[in-house]
Amino acid sequence: MGIFTFEKEYNKNVSLSEILDKFSNYLKNNGWQVQQKTGVDKAILQARKGGILRDLFAAGRALTFTFEQEPEKLRVKVGIGNWIQNIAITTIETLFLSSLFLLVDIPEMLWNKHIEEEILKELDKIINNA
């Protein structure tokens, strides 16, 4: 078991709400259920899906993306976390202080293929075109 997370920094200042709206639409159009919470300089987006990935994610688990905007830099971290109930009424600071990512037992090959090659490639496009 391990924490399968990926972190990337983008050397640019972007609108978090614009990035999250575009990325959320991409995920929804590809059959994901999405929830998000955006603050001034931090945001969280969660996505969960059945089908081919149902064995990777238990009903209460989701892909969890955190976004932190710093001066001239955006930091994105993605991993598997618990689906947060009532995310809309939880403060962004509380979410960032909690343990967002879980230890999970999934084959690293499946993680790399689907997450890094497909979803993160689309996120790269969205951020780089912002």
Image (cartoon, rainbow, N blue to C red):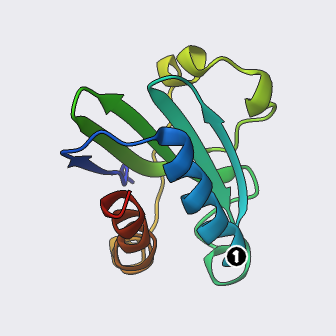
Provide residue 10's location: percent of width, then percent of height. Answer: 23, 48
The picture quadrant where one finds residue 103 is top left
As displayed, is residue 63 above or below residue 27? Answer: above
Whether residue 128 is visible: yes
| Residue ID for mark 1 | 29
Taking depth in this image into account, of 25 and 77 the one nearest to the observer is: 25
x and y percentages locating residue 58 in the rendered image: 69, 59
Residue placed most toward the observer, 80 or 21: 21
The answer to whether residue 99 is above or below residue 65 is: above
User: Is residue 68 placed above or below 34 in the rendered structure?
Assistant: above
What residue is at 62 percent from the left and 49 percent from the top?
46
The one of 7 and 24 positioned closer to us in this rendering: 24
Q: Is residue 18 left or right of residue 61?
A: left
Number of callouts in the render? 1
Which image quadrant for residue 121? bottom left
Please tell me how crowded label 1 is: few (under 14), some (14-19), or many (20+) other residues with Cα within 10 Å. Answer: few
Q: Secondary structure at mark 1?
A: helix
Residue 102 visible within the image? no
* Residue 82 occupies quadrant: top right
x 77%, y 30%: residue: 88
- Looking at numbered disc 1 in the image, what kind of residue is underneath it? Asn
Locate residue 72 relative to residue 88 in the image: left or right.
left
Task: Tell me what residue is drawn at x 34 percent, y 70 percent.
Answer: 108
| Left or right side of 110 for 25 | right
Residue 50 is situated, as x and y percent measured from the top left of the image, at 73, 74
Q: Position of residue 37 (x, y in %)?
A: 64, 34
Q: Quadrant of the N terminus?
A: bottom left
Q: Which quadrant would the C terminus be assigned to in this image?
A: bottom left
The residue at 37%/45% (across/down) is 77
Q: Is residue 29 above or below residue 124?
A: below
